[in-house]
Image (cartoon, rainbow, N blue to C red):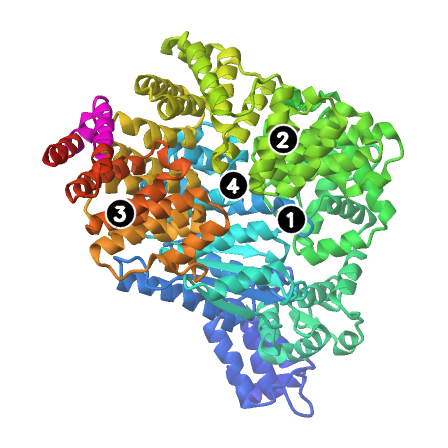
Amino acid sequence: ILHPTRLVKRGRSGKSLFFRLQEEGGYPVSVCRLLSDMIDVGVSGKSEFPFGSLKDVIDDLEHMASHPNIYLYDAVENFTLGFGQRYYGQKKEMSQLLQISMSLEQSVQSSPVSSALTPAEVVFVSGMPGIGKTHLVSRVGDFLSSLGCWIVAKIKFERGAERKSRQCLFSLFHQLVARIVEMKDGHSEAESSYNLRASKAISDVIDPSGLCILANYIPSIRELIPTAAKRVSIDCEMNLKPWQVTFLLSRLMGALLSLDRFVMLCVDDLQWCEPRIMGMLNEIIVQAGDNKWRCICVGTFRSNEVHYDSHPLMMHFDHLKESKHTNVTEMKLSSLSRDDVIEMLMNEMRLPRRLVLALADIVHKKTVGHALFIVQLLNSLVRDGTISYSPRKLQYDYDQKDLASVKTGESIATIIIANLELLSENDLQNLRIICCFGRQSYVSILHLIEGCPCVQSIGMLSSISTLVSNGILEQAGPVLEFSHDLIHQQVYENMTAEQRTQLQVNIGSFLGSLARLDDAPTEITSIEASVQQLNLSEENNRNNMQLGRILLTAVDLINSAGPECIELESQSVRFAKWNLFAAVEHKKKGNFQSVLHYCKNGISFLGKDIWSESQLSRELYEGAAFASYAIGNATDTKHYAEEIVEHVRFEESLFAQLMILRSLESADEHQHVIARGLAILRSLNFNIPKPTPFTVMETLVKTGSAASKYSMEDIISMQTSTTVDSSKRNALNIVGAVSMACYQTASPYYPLLICAIVNHSLENGVCVESGAAFALLGYYQIYLEGNYDSGKHWGDVAEKILERSTKPNDGRAVLTLKSFLFLWYKPLEKLANDLFDLYEVGMKTGNIDGAMYALCQYWRFSFARGEKLSILSLSYNRFMESMVKYCPSILKFLVLDISLTCELTGSSDDPYTYFEESINSEEELFWDAKEKNNSQLLQSIAHKRFLSAFLFGDFGKAATHSKEASSFPTSKTPKIQLIYHYFYHGLMAFHLYRDGEGESYLKEGKDMLEKFIIWNKHSPKTFGNKVLLLEAEYLASL
């Protein structure tokens, strides 16, 4: 570039070669620096960083060639130096994550028919806080999302906010669906097509009522599938068991994964996830793997907060590792290496490696490679001028002596605090205010704080801008968030307890006054009705979503301060009422964990004299009992409900009484449910006599007579013309809870309870809960009176009630109609198909109990109508895993049916393996039933043995087992088994008579024939052929 003689000559001018190249050549700064450091060396050289070796020269040139925008042409004076915006290090872990995703893609391409050859992929990333776990997963997720064939959703659990875990999980699925909604008006035909196919796939596996339930948790479903816009009642949601919600979420996930895109779920800070919600997520992942779905779930957790031998997360971790449906990969994230720090400094400072080595060594040594510590330290060095731009060198520069003397403390906490102290007092005060709201807050709400007279907040929006530019906060649209939990934690802990409490109470009270929380009525129903009327005094045009945020934010701030900060009793009542209002807000969203949280806080504000505010206390305790039951905590349900019963009048305690009965039912304490429930009902003037054969018959006759005064049209009109208030509905639900317990225990009170529901409905109004009672009234008209015409009439009434109901159908009522009542009137083939449809509806709505019972009945009806045994065997094999998983209560009965099929087909399959070695044979099942006095199971065993002996032609043995089965009271209850037991018994009896076993068998056979002649009048398609066969056997015996 310059002739050597000119170079020497000009060197005597006193200027360095670096500046002469700049002045005369106009070369890039990096080129001038490289040449100067190569040439302007020696005793008289002016280069400050001469090359130490030829390798360093080659390194500089290679960086210029490979990244010219950074190392060659970049104008360093035109940017502000800052660290933490880009990702460095952990290349091995990143490559591993990408390799897992690539393997999943390749397995699908190699076997598109089966969707995937491998189970679901689960990756756990652990490490110390601030080490880069979130950034690693986020970077991989962003990359996969950019490919177009991946849908990525991310959630983060919060410290101290386990109650929000359920809401957080639902937001994961909300993001997935929202992304598909965006595709509707996408930039490509492929996206629009995927949107339509996803909508159809979801609708195919979840029916409208199930979608409406999910839409309460996942609002984006309503945008994707308009038919899901209808809201379901909170009571319906409350009665959903947690695993039923899990099942619906699994079906949703399955619908999405059955298409041609992959899903990545990123779940951050699992150590703060509520254990039950972790269990739900765990089950959804296993379901994905079981169905070979194309899914990756990546979870992160802090290794210093998870003890491997005691933390609940580890139980789920081990479960996933042991599951055959998941591939689990564990990554223990390490600190950034020295080379990672060098790369960061080179890229951010636009300098070659040799010029950042000294800085990298000091930074890595002081931070031990901790990613957040490195970022905080480097940014602090920039702010205090230790690293600064040098106009003379045209680069960011540092003094090694100054750098070596920097005090960083023993942890990241000290440097975070030191960095905060550099803020202006106004910015620091606003940061403390923001910190009181938690890790996240809304800018619109923070803007309101400037009007709070008790809080010194000036220039909030300006402070937010400063804090974001300093990397303390991050802003995404309306949401403001601390850039890391550790920063929020240090700001929070650096305030005194008195400072925090005062800010929380002042800000919370101010926001509550803006929202006019003190003007809200106390009654929970009135609060729900008045929510639309609340407004901000000077912001009447704010939408309901913003209003809701302000309301809940105010209550959260007050709760953070706690009851101990309240001195006046009137304030305690005031804030307890605010918590009740917050509970109602979350109840409407179906967020029962938060309902419980706010009710418990409201109770704590009322303190020792809680029942001095009787109405408010009752509603708080009712909310706590309601929410505890909804999340599956029967013990707490009973505790809260019993507090109400102890302190309020009986008339006001009906809801609490119902909650106690439901908690006992959840614990399978059916006898206690019956005893307590009957006492409650008698206090409500229900006429329920002691069950004797006479009183049962008398009550059935009286009820049938009273009900017969109304036509079907009269009864149906009651359903639409009569309003059933909460007190009457609670009474009806109490009767329903007791009748279910009676059914479970075969209690003689059962028909009396059915009559009580029918009479109560006729007097107070018909609702969907009445449908099952009318169906069972028909059932008992047949069972106890043999009145088949009356049974059909009440069955038709029940069917109309259920059809006209605006609520989802009561699965138990429909199952009763199809399985126990209509079998006398409709063809078995149609009923079998209806039962399978009922199974599918149950699976689509999350009513798994009902679905499994319907499936069991479908198999029995199919057997009775003569379905091929090979087809039945295939059906058993297909569905039994679900039966074992979701409804083990009927497994003992079902294995008898499967065992009979195996015997008749000669199959070597052993259905007792479903018990996982607890019961290994029919004999062990018999003794188990004998020990537990399970008469229904003992009767079923005898019935199975009768069928087996008869079908193999051993009529003598069959007669013994038939007599044994008929000795149980339950043997004569109307059901499908009764039909083919009587039919085969009749055939057996005629054979034994002809074999000379006695006249009694001829009479038994004739009795069976007469029963079928009666039944044939009501359903010739079901009973006509059986009548002909029995008549033929009878005539052959004469």
Q: Position of residue 734 (x, y in %)?
A: 57, 26
Q: Name which residue type carries label 4.
A: Lys
> In front here: 662 or 197?
662
CA separation in Å, label 3 and label 4? 43 Å
For marks 2 and 3, give the one nearer the viewer. 3
Magenta stretch, residue numbers: 1005-1026
The disc label shown at residue 958, or none: 3
Of the residues under marks 3 and 4, which one precedes in the sequence? 4
Q: Residue at x 17, y 43 (%)?
A: 996
Q: Which label sits in the foreground, 1 or 3?
A: 3
Element at badge 3? helix
Percent position (x, y) of residue 804? 39, 19
Of the numbered discs 2 and 3, the one sitting upstream in the chain is 2
Give the numbered dot on residue 241.
4
Earlier residue among tags 4 and 1: 1
- Residue, x 56% and y 49% (percent of image)? 277
Residue type at tag 3: Ala
Say whether marks 2 and 3 touch (CB < 8 Å). no
Q: For residue 59, say whether it is visible.
A: yes
Q: Which mark is residue 676?
A: 2
Q: Nearer the viewer, mark 1 or mark 2?
A: 2
